[in-house]
Image (cartoon, rainbow, N blue to C red):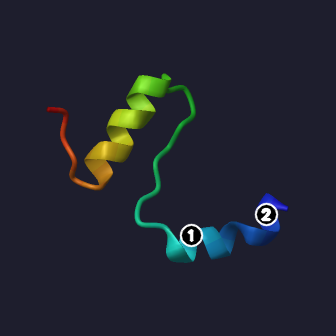
Amino acid sequence: LMEARRHLYEDVATAVVATDGRTPEEVTQAALDAVELKEA
């Protein structure tokens, strides 16, 4: 199902964040950085 829909998700994505080999905290920070939000 993911492969069938991948192009749809990519078309509407604001950002794409790689998750392989990253901790949840690293993924969260990368997502925040991608949308230009910073920690308080």
Asked whether, in this view, residue 24 is left or right of residue 36, the answer is right
Q: Would you place residue 8 above or below residue 26 in this image?
A: below
In primary-sequence order, the first of circles 2 and 1 is 2
Q: Would you place residue 30 above or below residue 9 in this image?
A: above
Q: Which residue is mark 1?
A: 10
Q: Where is residue 18? Give x, y as percent.
A: 50, 43
Label 1 neighbourhood size at 10 Å, few (<14), some (14-19), many (20+)? few
Residue at 14 percent across and 32 percent down: it is: 40
Q: How many marks?
A: 2
Q: Which quadrant is home to the N terminus?
A: bottom right
Q: Where is residue 23? Give x, y as percent.
A: 48, 22
Kind of residue sitting beneath label 2: Glu
Residue at 33 percent across and 35 percent down: it is: 29
Residue located farthest toward the front when viewing the structure as drawn: 40
Label 2 neighbourhood size at 10 Å, few (<14), some (14-19), many (20+)? few
Q: Where is residue 25? Give x, y as percent.
A: 41, 25
Q: Where is residue 39? Give x, y as percent.
A: 19, 33
The label on residue 19 is: none
Residue located farthest toward the left when viewing the structure as drawn: 40
The alpha-carbon separation of the residues under discs 2 and 1 comes to: 11 Å
Which of the 4 image quadrants contains residue 38?
top left
Residue located farthest toward the right when viewing the structure as drawn: 1
Kind of residue sitting beneath label 1: Glu
Asked whether, in this view, residue 13 is left or right of residue 31, the answer is right
Q: Which residue is mark 2?
A: 3
SS at circle 2: helix
Q: Are marks 2 and 1 in contact (CB under 8 Å)?
A: no
SS at circle 1: helix
Which of the 4 image quadrants contains residue 2?
bottom right
